[in-house]
Amino acid sequence: MAQAILRPSVWGALAPMLAMVQCAGRIASTSDIAGIDDGGPGWVEAASSSEAAAPFDASDTGPPVGIGDGSAAPSDGGPDRDESSIAGQDASDATIATASDGAAMEASVNDAAFQSDVVPPTVVELTAGIMHACALLADGTVACWGDNEYSELGDGTDASGSATPVIVAGLSGVTSVSAGHLQTCTGLSDGGAVCWGENASGDLGANTPYEWQITPVAVSALSGVVTVAAGYDDTCALLTDGGVVCWGNNEQGQLGSGTSASYSVTPVNVPGVSPATSLGLANGTVCAVLAEGTVDCWGGNGMGELGTGAYGLDPTPTPVPGITNAISVSGGLGVNECVLLDGGTVDCWGAGFSRSVPGSPTPLAVPGVGGLTAIAAGEEHVCGLLPSGAVVCWGSYAVASNDGGFDGVDPTIVPGLTDAIALAAGKGFTCAIRSNGTVVCWGVDQPMATASPCGLAGCSLTPTALLW
């Protein structure tokens, strides 16, 4: 899913209560090693090529930074750190792929050429599903691209996907957007929410199961929405009073209602998690950061994704032991959860990502990572944002090694990206908003997708400009 930064207008209204809202598969915007096991649940073998991209250098993480309005600058007003020399990489001489022929050109990322006559609009928030992505634009509309088999693009069709962004039909006044597995939802300026796409388990919350929707439909009986978080086949919303409601599939207890029966086509209240400040939806699991910095999780737990040390589903919100200073949580539609902690470190649990970030049913610190301002979890990888605009990623399809391998990469700086301000991660791909409001994506395409979530040129090993 995911993941995205709150726009300043939204954040300003809620700053006294919220530190940051993070939705699964959306961006991002916003943990002490408990031991490394020898191959527990979700073990992922690390890439072993001696020519792999240089790993993230923990000695250059700099001071902790705040989240505030989601900007990439340090919250204390101190000087920005320069990651251009991390692991011997020169960020001033970036390589970025053009969409015209997929070939690489030597250029600063800030000067990357767009091979299109269309001037890209300003993007203020990103979100990524399994095989599609969406952008909230500065004018309050939404554009989506990628797979469209279940109308997850919301353009009024259920035809093949689009490698260029298409405007979601009849939608304006959007304040947040979240892409799930095959559905997409948005929060609106009037406090309501709309969804479109697949609806087999009531994923859209529109009081109608089974029938997918090719254009947005209103979520029933819902008001006071701050942000929405779309999951695998369920969706949740964070409300202005800090409460959480969820709808859709409940076979693993992911609606948090104390039962694991069937599904709900309308929102149901999740008791005991108010005031919440951040939501992260994985595959059948939901986690919420509470105002005091603790984390509660509920739902599926086959790989330890509740973080409690046990296995087996739990339909009741349960605290994750040892987490007391969480800022945001990201699930990414996989079978794991990660939290950004105060100070910019990250803890993850559930399925593993690499040799240094193995599977665990309790939180494990991601080694060598610090000073991050945001995280975005994909299905099998996670990326984090550094204050300078550089990006560090780990897991499968996170950063390509020089020999083309993707599996199990330890934390590594993404080459050629030095001005990112927000991230979104999906299944095998990642996108970033740059400081000029444009978007770049990288990763690998999925063979079953009807169009690439990376754009017209398809996914590649280096960040590639999204064409409009």
Image (tube, helix red, strand yellow):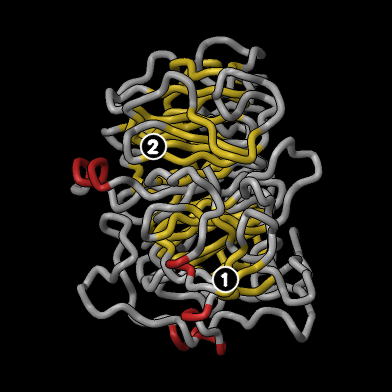
**Quadrant (top left/top right/bottom left/bottom right) for the N terminus:** top right
Residue 26 as seen in the image, left or right of residue 344: right
Instruction: Residue type at mark 1: give it.
Output: Val
Q: Residue furthest top?
A: 208
Q: Pointers 2 and 1 in contact (CB under 8 A)?
A: no
**At which x and y percent is residue 319?**
47, 50
Depth check: 225 or 273 in front? 225
Q: CA distance from mark 2 to mark 1?
A: 27 Å
**At which x and y percent is residue 175?**
34, 35
Depth check: 414 or 297 in front? 414
Compared to 113, does 4 lie above or below? Answer: above
Instruction: Residue type at mark 2: give it.
Output: Ser
Compared to 443, does 207 lie above or below? Answer: above
Is there any visible trace of residue 46 in the rendered image? yes
Residue topped by disc 2: 176
What residue do we see at 24% from left, 68% from top? 75
Compared to 400, does 135 lie above or below? Answer: above
Residue 373 as seen in the image, left or right of residue 44: left
Residue topped by disc 1: 414
Local SS, label 2: strand
What residue do we see at 57% from left, 52% from top? 425
**At which x and y percent is residue 121?**
40, 43
